[in-house]
Image (cartoon, grey):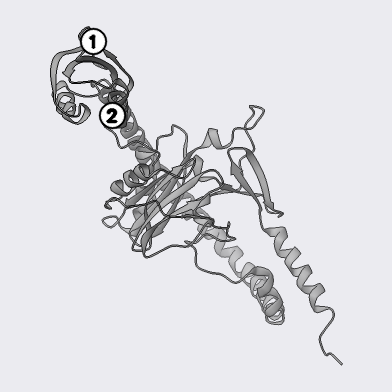
Amino acid sequence: MSSSNPKQPLRTTWLTRFARGFSPSRWLRASEGLQRLSEGGGGQEWILARAFCAYTVLDGAAVPPRKRRAFAEMSVARWAPFADVQSHVEWIGDKAMVWAWSRSRVLAGEDGEPLPPPRRILPESLLRGAPQEHGEALAAMADGCEGRVWRGGVMQASRWWPAAPELHEWNEFRRGAGLSPAAMVPDLQALALGERTWSAQRRVDFGDALGQYRNYLVAGAAGLAAAVFSALLVGAFALKASIWQVERDIADREKALEKIINARDAALQAQGAITQALALRPPAGQLELLSLMPRLFRGNWQLVEWKMPDAQTLEVTARMANPDPRAIVSAWEDSKRFADVTAQLGRQADTVVVKARVLRDSAGGKP
């Protein structure tokens, strides 16, 4: 005859439901809207699709631990490409992994009205896969995919694509992370959405812990209740004596915080002025553009005419044997320095006239 207790599964189910009542319901916030992943009674927790996020890594080796939070907030405010930035920061040693997003874009509803903000937002990247000491990976996300480069257990570089990248796009990402070009794009990994972030230490499930140690917990709860009651009686008098000191400390902290906020606002205003001034610069100098021509015109060629009607428009007339306008347009656009490229044969059979809009020198792609 079996000696198992038939009430044990019922108790375990009740404890699991009890724990779930204090846990938030989990939702996936993707480009198509919100999708419920699990139920809970403690508010909402959103898993934010990688497509919404920008990513960077901060070096806090020179920052004392007690000042790293303020350091991260200031650095994110300067770096983030959003006016209404929200972020999630994970410290691994002296490195801070930062995901940032636009609050208004994330909370935008399908009917144009903003959605109620959730209790917490976690980046999707933190719940797919596991950290590596070193290496690289291409992981499938809810929307698109994410390239990852690991160094010392830190995701040193991350980039999102709406679809699996071509080889030249993957190698651009590798070069940005300080790696040499690869011969092929790695296989796309389909990673399930985990229950916990891979940056957090593994913890025992709440329901399992209650079921395993319930007798100890009951005794501990009784002792704790008695201790709390005694502490309340003793602490009531001490609380009155400490209220004055607490209020004084709060006033001092508010003054210090006001100084920090004023300094931060001044720094952000100065940064905006610098950004506007830099935007007035031409996309490229004529000497820089002229140095690109040998790579854009293949074979033997001769410059006949060079014109720039304005700082963003270039018109070049070149002489060459059997010019191929389609090949010329492709070479110019593949250089990532020109857009809206057109190439037409000139009045003479061996000349070609190329017109293009000049772009700034940038690696491109989403961070």
Badge 2: residue crowd in 10 Å (few <14, some 14–19, many ≥20):
some
**Real-space Cα distance between discs 2 and 1?**
19 Å
Disc 2 versus disc 1: nearer the observer: 1
What secondary structure is found at the residue carrying circle 2? helix
Residue type pointed to by label 1: Gly
Q: Which residue is mark 2?
A: 331
Pick the residue in front: 73 or 234: 73
The image shows residue 20, relative to residue 336, as above or below, that is below
Q: Which mark is residue 177?
A: none
Residue at the outermost bottom position: 1
- The residue at the far right in this view is 1
Nearer to us in this view, 103 or 143: 143
- Which image quadrant is residue 1 in? bottom right
Return the x and y of residue 43 as percentages of the image width and height. Answer: 67, 50
Which residue does the numbered mark 1 point to in the structure image?
A: 346
Image spot of residue 12 (x, y percent): 76, 73
Type of residue at label 2?
Ala
**In the picture provided, is 223 more to the left or to the right than 187?**
right
Secondary element type, mark 1: loop
Q: Residue at x 40, y 64 (%)?
A: 132
Taking the image as drawn, is residue 96 in sight?
yes
